[in-house]
Image (spheres, grey):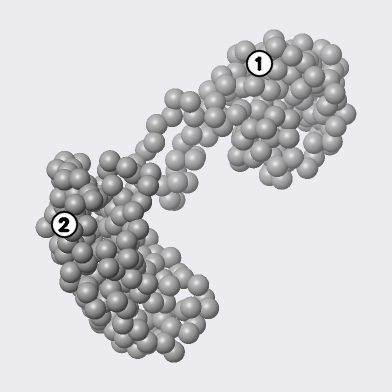
Amino acid sequence: MSFIQQAILTKKAALADAISEPMGSISRDCAAIWPQADALDRILQDAIKNIPHCHLLYAWDINGIEISSMVQADSIDPSWRGRDLSQRPYLKNHLPFKGVMLSSVYMSQYVPKQCITALQAVSKNNNLLGFIAADFAVADLLQDAHLTAPEMHWQQFRGDPAVRGTVFMQERTPSLLDTHIDSALDLIYRLMTQHGVFHSKIHFSSGRCSLWLFDDPYNYRLHGVDEVINPDICLTYPVCAYPANAKITPEQIHHILDEFKSLRFADETLYLRSSSINIINGLVGLTFSCDGSHYMPADEFLQKDLSFWLGTLNTRADVKRSK
């Protein structure tokens, strides 16, 4: 299971735990008077305050027809009674015969918000009568949320099949950046270690470099070869102490850039097209001529040598499949 999948499941489990008891209580109260619309409205409006972050409650039968009003804490809207809800996103999944089920995030038709709906089955004498739906705005659920650092591990993504299929019909064309690669990589090293650049992306084939700074992380700087080999460019970047929270050391940056150069020139058919370094999250990114991409922690990248990328792949067909 990926980090993202685990994070989603954790947030949904926390929501389900918080609402299962009040939703179960509402279900039992509604079952006693089902399907009396006015009585359902009174129960729902009285109960909505007991469900954290819920902004809308409503009831519908087993055919997806709404039988209550749209009930909010301060209003009751009967105009939706009798409306067919069977095409709503949460009805595309298997519905619960007991307990609570949470939908995926979707755009609400009733309020212009991204929502999650919790469905609670309503039963009487073991017969399913319908469901209570509780809507939660994603913005409300995430008010007190904090970003969690993603798990860093090697990830590989296959590129465009059209590019992969013709990779062995092409050959690397030397770029202007290739001609000045030592000067360019040396300057990038100095910008990252002395001038506050925390993320750099080098486009070898097209001859450009994108840089992100600590002091201005929302705007990246884009430089062509003439600028990225000009030592005076350092005058446009403030001097900045190397960050204490960096996951990559200056020495590692030097070795990583050397490896980028090696991968760029290692083979005339399978070669590095672009690469990136982020010293804060510690990731190195690589995109090859076949359009295949790799992302891995810097420590892991530095443990690989050319044999990992090229030498262990003895035939061009094997190279093609691996990338």
In this view, the mark in front (1 or 2): 2
Q: CA distance from mark 1 to mark 2?
A: 59 Å
User: Which image quarter: residue 188?
Assistant: bottom left
Amino acid type at circle 1 is Ile
User: Which image quarter: residue 69?
Assistant: top right
Left or right of 66 on screen, residue 173: left
Numbered badge on residue 48: 1
Residue positioned 44% across, 51% down in the render: 1
Q: Percent from the top left, x then y, of residue 207?
A: 33, 71
Q: Is residue 217 above or below residue 121?
A: below
Q: Residues within 10 Å of mark 1 (few under 14, many from 20)?
A: many
Residue positioned 18% across, 69% down in the render: 183
Q: Percent from the top left, x then y, of residue 222?
A: 35, 58
Left or right of 298 on screen, residue 172: right
Q: Percent from the top left, x then y, of residue 103?
A: 63, 38
Give the labeled residue for mark 2.
190
Which residue lies most toward the left here? 251
